[in-house]
Amino acid sequence: MEIKGLLFDFDGTLANTIDLILATFRHTFKHCLNREIPEREIIKTFGLPLAEAMARYAPTPAKAEEMCAVYREYNLTNHDRMIKEIPGTRDALENFHKQGLKLAVVTSKKNAMTRRGLKCCGLDPYVSVVVSSEDTARSKPHPEPMLKACELLGLKPEECICVGDSPFDLQSGRAAGALTAAVTYTSFVWQDILEDGQPDFIIDNICDLITIIDKINFSKEEI
């Protein structure tokens, strides 16, 4: 099957937002619960919808809503100065775009902040579809977000590679029927990526996908 599309996670995959997310979580927990949260605990929530992440720690639903509001306010205020481009990503997406590949971002973030992040990193001209937490009833690791992205791209899941930095991304892509690729610059425990995500491919940067796609589409060589 020829690869015609790529389904990217955003945070930690296309953009370096780790410092921003960590700082936002710490601010939220200090402001709302007067407590500190270990970095490893924060990382475990990466890829989950914000409401689900906060519900794990909030004593009441009302407190969870408050925490989400505080999180979003701090994140919005500091977003543009703290988000960072991952080296080589813009060039890779431009290359894919020129090849005629269809590109989507599938994220647990809200749509407006995702598009803002894409614009900050200069990636917005190359991404035709964004599937956010607002667009599906169920979030990653359920396959619904990936299936929605394929539908909007006009592609079959088996014509796509799902690329992410968390087990949730890879589980969602695999369940949808897509091939999967894990980035090695993830903040997650690598063994969890391998065991829980079971990626088909492992890449050190987004540019590595160029070789993978070429081998699938233009040769009979097994990968």
Image: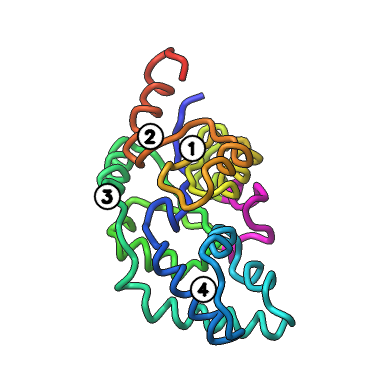
Find residue 165 and report its horizontal and vertical position in percent: 49, 48
The residue indicated by pointer 2 is 209
Q: Does residue 217 lie above or below 197 as drawn?
A: above
Mark 2 Cα shell of 10 Å, populated few (<14), some (14-19), many (≥20)? many
The residue lying toward the viewer, choosing from 71 and 219, is 71
Q: Does residue 28 lie above or below 145 as drawn?
A: below
Mark 4 Cα shell of 10 Å, populated few (<14), some (14-19), many (≥20)? many
The amino acid type, in three-letter code, at marker 1 is Ala
The residue indicated by pointer 3 is 87
Spatial separation of the CA atoms under disc 1 and disc 3: 18 Å
- Among the 4 quarters of the image, the one containing residue 100: top left
Question: Can you tell which mark lies on residue 25?
Answer: 4
Q: Earlier in the sequence, mark 3 or mark 4?
A: 4
Q: Is residue 139 left or right of residue 183?
A: right
Comparing labels 1 and 4, the label whose residue is closer to the camera = 4
The amino acid type, in three-letter code, at marker 4 is Phe
- Span shown in magenta: 133-148
Residue at 37% over, 73% down: 79
The residue lying toward the viewer, choosing from 146 and 121, is 121
The residue indicated by pointer 1 is 181
